[in-house]
Image (tube, rainbow, N blue to C red):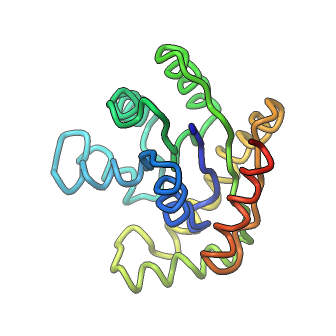
Amino acid sequence: MRLILMGPPGAGKGTQAKVIAAHYGIPAISTGDIFRANVAGRTQLGVEAQRYMDAGDYVPDEITNAMVRDRLGLDDAKPGFLLDGYPRTLAQVKELDGMLADYDITLDTVVSLTVDRDELVKRLLQRAEVEGRADDTEDVIRRRQELYAEQTSPLIDVYAERGMLLEIEGKGSVSSVTERIFDGLATLA
């Protein structure tokens, strides 16, 4: 199974990605986790990425694309993967299409979690308080929501046109959202 999991920041992608990946025995590849690992390791890439993340901006495509290409080339991703947080722009869709062609693989589907914006802000502020995440201030959260609407929402149209989009309501308990995802994926099999 090769999936993309999409949705605005706070939609529950990270939580659902772990469950879906475990169910299918594939790695959940999160650009957020890759960025945070590089930041924590104080790599050159991490220092550069940190500057963008602190401002609530997306890390530039050239950095993100290189990290994703390398990650998809690892052995554990050969039988399948779940991409969480990538692609985020139309340019990244084109880049991903090229990567997949280079690896001679195709995507199975794109799952898009939909959640009301006020609910998203509430969730992220709670997460910031619980986890002490410096990148989750209200201003940064609202900026990320704006960027998502501007840059990432158009991808939903692209994948819908390709007949690959599965939209799932992301509000409710984790288990109810998970159930909706698996029910939706079962209808595609």
Position of 101 with respect to 25 (left or right) is: right
Q: How many labels does the image show?
A: 0
Residue at point 35%, 79% (across, down): 131
Residue 80 in percent (x, y) is at 49, 36
Residue at point 43%, 50% (across, down): 30
Residue 39 in percent (x, y) is at 24, 53
Between 66 and 170, the residue placed more toward the observer is 170
Task: Give the position of the C terminus as an image quadrant.
Answer: top right
Task: Give the position of the N terminus as an image quadrant.
Answer: top right
Reply above or below: 138 against 53.
below
Reply above or below: 103 against 62.
above
Position of 8 with respect to 34 (left or right) is: right
Between 29 and 129, the residue placed more toward the observer is 29
Position of 105 with respect to 36 (left or right) is: right
The answer to which quarter of the image holds residue 183 is bottom right
The answer to which quarter of the image holds residue 175 is bottom right
Residue at point 16%, 51% (across, down): 41
Reply above or below: 126 against 67.
below
Residue 36 in percent (x, y) is at 30, 55
**Residue most toward the left?**
42
Between 148 and 186, the residue placed more toward the observer is 186
Between 168 and 37, the residue placed more toward the observer is 168
Residue at point 69%, 59% (across, down): 181
The answer to which quarter of the image holds residue 114 is bottom right
